[in-house]
Image (cartoon, rainbow, N blue to C red):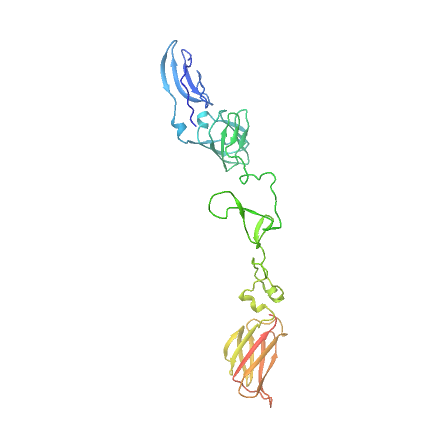
């Protein structure tokens, strides 16, 4: 913000160079040693014993209107870096260097507009911006902060508020609640206006501060877990989802089947690696995935125009034998087709 300085008079020191300057509040003064660190230059006025003999305008209006950026290295140990008024007038001030101790940045004690302060230093030490006698603010390493001087202390331009920065006093930790008792606040539409409660279904849950989806049930839509092989074999859950690749693990589902011709040629099958024609009326079935043991079930039917019956014989976990016999004589006789199914644990 610009400050208008009213016209006035100032007594100069004769036979000297007078350094005329002003504060951020617009108070004009002079000295004969040089421009002050906490003031802004106006002019250098050279006087003899009774008159002005030279004048150099030192005002720089552009520096007040155009955002400036400056970088300072503050590498080293514990110490203080003093910024002049002209340096502090920049809108962006960056500090760099490897710190080996906590550093203090001292700024002029005058009301200032907000400055973007970037702590781009390294080393596990603090960087604090303050006035000589007032309080200040530490800028986190690797972060930026907007600071200003209120004439006494250095303050944050944007302080912590509800929902911004640190948690507010009286914040509640929520755990184990469903959305029927825990609420979300926001906007249900993209329009502007006051915040409102967002309505959610009972399929959401809030546990330990994490919003999630409740498990699905017969009456509630929600999250569904995929059943693994052991859960399929247990056949007890009514909430797990069954992927197609694990359906055969259920104890009530056939583990393999085959439709074969008279010469043990496979016409259609599932989980059968091959058939062997072992002679008239005999086929051997080789399962692609073996059963856990020989204690499983093999069932066969025959497609025939004569009076035949099927006899099954489990030899091992991997192989079953099916015989086709004449129901009268018991002689082995080829049918037209074999239909064979296996049940059990794999």
The relative height of residue 224 versus residue 260 in the rendered view (above or below) is above
Q: Indicate the quadrant containing the N terminus: top left, top right, bottom left or bottom right.
A: top left
Left or right position of 232 against 16: right
**Depth order, front residue of 106/156:** 156
Write the residue at 45% across / 25% down: 85
Residue lying at the far bottom in this picture: please name it.
329
The relative height of residue 167 versus residue 264 in the rendered view (above or below) is above
Residue lying at the far top in this picture: please name it.
49
Write the residue at 58% across / 75% down: 342
The quadrant holding residue 31 is: top left
The relative height of residue 77 versus residue 326 in the rendered view (above or below) is above
Residue 322 place in picture, x, y as percent: 58, 81
Left or right position of 225 against 71: right
The quadrant holding residue 328 is: bottom right
**Depth order, front residue of 145/293:** 145
Residue lying at the far right in this picture: please name it.
295
Residue 185 place in picture, x, y as percent: 54, 45
The quadrant holding residue 213 is: bottom right
Q: Indicate the quadrant containing the C terminus: top left, top right, bottom left or bottom right.
A: bottom right
**Depth order, front residue of 232/47:** 232
Write the residue at 58% across / 49% down: 210
Residue 115 place in picture, x, y as percent: 47, 32
Residue 147 place in picture, x, y as percent: 49, 32
The relative height of residue 296 versus residue 131 in the rendered view (above or below) is below
Left or right position of 55 against 240: left
């Amino acid at each position: 913000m610009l400050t208008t300085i009213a016209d006035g008079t100032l007594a100069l020191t004769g036979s000297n160079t007078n350094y005329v300057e002003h504060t951020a509040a617009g108070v004009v003064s002079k000295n004969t040693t040089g421009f002050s660190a906490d003031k802004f230059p106006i002019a250098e006025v050279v006087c003899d014993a009774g008159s002005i003999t030279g004048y150099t305008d030192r005002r720089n209006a552009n520096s007040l209107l155009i955002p400036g950026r400056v970088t300072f290295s503050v590498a080293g140990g514990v110490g203080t870096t003093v910024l002049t008024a002209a340096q502090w007038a920049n809108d962006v001030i960056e500090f760099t260097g490897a710190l080996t101790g906590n550093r203090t940045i001292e700024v002029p004690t005058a009301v200032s507009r907000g400055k973007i302060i970037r702590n781009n230093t390294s080393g596990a030490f603090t960087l604090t911006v303050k006035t000589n006698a007032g309080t200040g603010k530490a800028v986190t390493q690797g972060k930026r902060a907007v600071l200003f001087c209120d004439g006494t202390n250095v303050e944050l331009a944007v302080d912590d508020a509800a929902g911004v920065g640190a948690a507010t006093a009286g914040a509640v930790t929520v755990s184990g609640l469903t959305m029927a008792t825990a609420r979300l606040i926001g906007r249900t539409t993209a329009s502007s206006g006051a915040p409102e409660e967002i309505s959610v279904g009972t399929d959401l849950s809030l546990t330990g501060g994490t919003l999630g989806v409740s498990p699905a049930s017969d009456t509630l839509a929600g999250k569904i877990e995929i059943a693994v092989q052991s859960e399929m074999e247990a056949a007890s859950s009514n909430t797990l989802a069954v992927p197609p690749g694990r359906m055969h693990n259920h104890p009530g589902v056939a583990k393999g089947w085959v439709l074969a011709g008279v010469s043990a040629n496979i016409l259609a099958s599932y989980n059968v690696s091959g058939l062997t024609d072992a002679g008239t009326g005999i086929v051997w079935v080789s399962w692609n995935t073996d059963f856990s043991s020989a204690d499983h079930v093999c069932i066969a039917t025959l497609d025939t125009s004569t009076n035949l019956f099927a006899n099954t014989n489990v030899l091992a976990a991997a192989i079953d034998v099916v015989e086709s016999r004449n129901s009268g004589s018991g002689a082995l006789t080829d049918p037209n087709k074999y239909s064979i199914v296996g049940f059990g644990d794999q």
